[in-house]
Image (tube, helix red, strand yellow):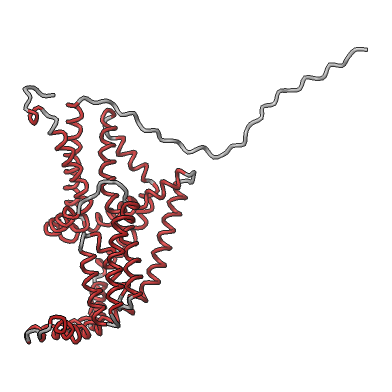
Amino acid sequence: MAREVPAEVPLQVVRSEPGPAPAPVELPEPEVELSEAEARWVDFAWSLGMVGSLALVFELLSVFGGVAVPVLLALFMAYVLNPPVTALERRGLNRAVGSSVVFGACVLLMVGAVLYLIPVFRDEAAKLPDFFLRASERVVPQVEALLGRPLPDLLRQRMTELGGQASELLQSAGPTAARLVASFAGNTARFVATLLGLLVVPVLAFFFLQDYPKLVGRVKGLVPRRAVGLISRRFSEVDDVLSAFVRGQITVGAILSVLYSTGLGLARIDMAIVIGAISGFGNMVPYLGTTLGVVLALLGVMLSWQGPWQLAVVVGTFVVAQMAEGFFITPRVVGDKVGLSSVTVIIAILAFGELFGFTGILLAVPTTAILKVVLRVVVERYQKTALYKGEGSAS
């Protein structure tokens, strides 16, 4: 009996279900080996371009401040928030979603902090007039007791007058501020422009944050291909110096503010949160925050003296916070990145504040970070030239 041959089964192609395309992995471009002469010209051109860009930024701020300031603030926010968004993106989260998550978390954190801190600062501010009156009445006798001799009558009189004047000034600060706001709002054009500028900052920051890699890629795409590796390395050096100060000091300031506020609160000092915030975030200007915090805390101890234990708690708070900042907080937060020295920051703030006012103070640190890298690069290249080495021919 003949065996039946089974009918030929048509070959079926099984197609996999379409899924999300894997995120493209950006491979670093291989750096072209440049000769010393080529690298020197690239570094000099980059340095000149950075100095010219900084000059252009300050010129735009002086001419188009109303437009340039919101854009710069938005770029600053995008720069600060880019690392956590990039970290989420590396874990497989879409950048738009990651930007929304980080931005939403920051908004909720800021709203919560404002809702919590406004009543606290309002209550603390209400104590300021009485604080200065008590300071003028009690500090002088306590200082005289410590010195063992009376202060000159002129000094006693001046301190009492200053206390009364400060109290009267603070009591009238609320109505004066209200009148200033009302007069400013009366100028409709200025008020609307300022309001729109403030409202547009978070919107611009969100879009800058979402498109941050594209913006960097477009700038990188304008660089000559042979020089892209070296110039990318220079920008990475600027980022290391800048992030070590900006991101690091903001985080360190927040941690120190909590430590100071907690310690001064345990010492039962009035305005502990205000003094703690001034001491913590004031450390962005080296020595300023700690100095102001110590002075205000000692003044608070003198006004609310309950025994030597208060002074011990205050001293212990500042000692522990400074040791923690030096040995634990800053090394963990900032790491081994080369930041800006204290003397450099102080000189930069004074110089740029004198030249460009409040805007100069805001831009003093990032500008100095860029100029520091530019100066170092120029000096390094100069030290490799035949002129510096005293050789007969250029290398």
Q: Is residue 148 left or right of residue 105?
A: left
Viewed as shown, does residue 295 lie left or right of 269? Answer: left
Identify the residue at the far top of this view. 2
Decide which of 348, 205 is in the foreground and name it: 348
Q: Nearer the viewer, residue 101 or 154?
A: 154
Residues 178 and 245: in front is: 245
Residue 384 seen anywhere in this rendered image of the structure? yes
Residue 361 image-quadrant placement: bottom left
Q: How many marks?
A: 0
Residue at (40, 33) in percent of width and height: 27
* x and y percentages locating residue 150 in the rendered image: 10, 86
Residue appearing at x 41%, y 61% in the figure: 107
Can see residue 61?
no
Dividing the picture into quadrants, the one containing residue 394 is top left
Q: Considering the image in quadrants, where does the N terminus appear? A: top right
* Residue 4 against residue 48 in the figure, above or below: above
Figure check: 139 above or below 18? below
Q: Quadrant of the C terminus?
A: top left
Q: Position of residue 75 (x, y in %)?
A: 31, 51
Residue that lies at the very extreme toward the right in this rendered image: 1
Taking 61 as reference, is 161 above or below it?
A: below
Q: Position of residue 234 (x, y in %)?
A: 25, 38
Residue name at image x 16 percent, y 35 percent: 380
Res 216 → quadrant: top left
